Amino acid sequence: MTKHFQRTSLHSTQARCAFVQVTLLQAVNRRANSAAWLFLLFWSLPCSACRAQEAHRASLAGSDTAAARHEAAQRLVDPAFQLGPTTWMAGAAIGLLASDNIRLESVDPKSDLAAQPELHARMVWPLSVNNAINLNVRSGYSAYLQHTEFNRFYIGPESELAFELYAGDWRVALHDRLSVLQNNYQDPTVVGSGDYSQLDNRIGASAIWDLNEVLFGLRYDHVNYLSYSDSEAIARRLPNAQSEVFSSSLGYRSNPGFMVGLESGGTLFDYENPGSGGTFADAIEWTVGPFIDVQISDYLSSQASAGYLRYMPKSNYAGAQGDLEGVFAQVAVKHHLNQYVEYTLSGGRNIAFALYGGTFALSNVRFQTDWNVIRHWKLIASLMYEHGSDVSAGGETFDRFGPTIRAERRVAAQWFTSIEYQFYQRDSNLPGRDYRANLLSMQLAYEF
């Protein structure tokens, strides 16, 4: 889930992405095992540590975006074909999603089975040794067996067109990122909806000035949010909107494994119909605070940020919430225990902007372990907990938690498969907004 304001600084991880870009271009000309790339492209689990590096996204459902994009961008090996100066890889997949609560309802939940065919394409066009244009697209269709009214297209959150330019000590990146939500449970504020679809289009630029020991970063994004639903009630709960997102950071790197600095950011929210549904208000938000990234050892790393946050909604409807201020914080620790096990512990608190549910103060914690103990299989187990409070007057307070268990395997040279089980328990202080959901998904992918 992506937070209303997430850490947008261009330090540590984004600086490392510059190195990743060079590595990626070099990898295009090498022949290597492509299983890892396809696994990451199709089946990446949310990575909370990566989320902390992503610019704000107005939908909480966008939390997968940073992890999916960064992981996919690192792998383009054993390419399928070349067209002129461009190198391509493509593939297809068929997935099945079984749920005993497709509308996330508290009473009389409905079960169904959905087929989810997908296509993906990945392209790199190197313009020089260090500069390149990247295209990454993943799109599919959810087709329900019984409740066909919920059939819909989706676009994966890692889909983007990006151009990176290196000039002296500067790295400049331009991007256009597009996504349409795939599953309603990706947004913790969604309740009682089976056709929740929101287009998120983000156009922006970022720049890093790397002076070896000092890194200075700037970023700007213009984001459009469009609702797609035939239901008038859902359309009222999912109004169109746009936002302007700004951020800057200044970091000091005393050695390759330690960086500390200060970052700040701001967001301007603009709803097409302010006050729609009685909870939505145009708003301004800004944050400022320190951050620290530490590579404790070759196997243990940590990231943390905290600071002051102020949220100022415009009082354009009766009962609107006044200004809010407080502390935001994010922390993540990743430990590669040995060749068989690694784990990540992450969490934080922030003001979260969810188009479906208005604006929430959101706290979350997630623990994930990766196991390589069975030959040819990768096992992933995670447990997450979320606590949210609607900042509008008389709003909702909810708790949501649940485990996820996943298994991935390369079946043959060009075939890959995965199976995943998820459970969600949501408890709310408002009637009719609790739910319990069991989800089982399987996918078979082919690379061509």
Image (cartoon, helix red, strand yellow):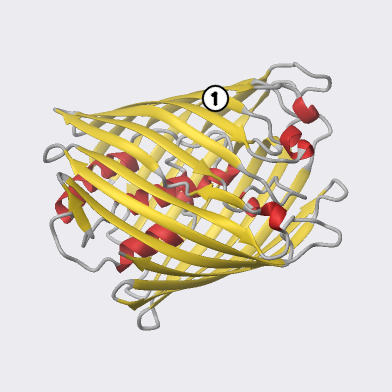
* Quarter of the figure that contains the C terminus: bottom left
Q: Is residue 84 above or below residue 319?
A: below
- Looking at the picture, how far across and down is residue 64, in whole percent? 49, 50
* Nearer to us in this view, 330 or 222: 222
Instruction: Please say whether residue 23 is visible from this viewpoint.
Output: no
Q: Quadrant of residue 247?
A: top left
- Looking at the picture, how far across and down is residue 377, in whole percent? 40, 78
Residue furthest to the bottom in view is 375
Residue under the image location 34 percent in, 38 percent down: 161
Mark 1 closeness class: few <14, some 14–19, many ≥20 residues within 10 Å: many
- Looking at the picture, how far across and down is residue 27, in whole percent? 17, 55
* Nearer to us in this view, 1 or 179: 179
- Give SS at disc 1: strand
On the rendered structure, is 145 left or right of 223? right
* Nearer to us in this view, 10 or 262: 10
- Looking at the picture, how far across and down is residue 103, in whole percent? 74, 55
Q: Which residue is mark 1?
A: 243
On the rendered structure, is 219 left or right of 98? left
Q: Quadrant of residue 275?
A: top right
Residue under the image location 39 percent in, 72 percent down: 416
Give the residue type at disc 1.
Ser
On the rendered structure, is 201 left or right of 386? left
Q: Is residue 330 above or below residue 437?
A: above
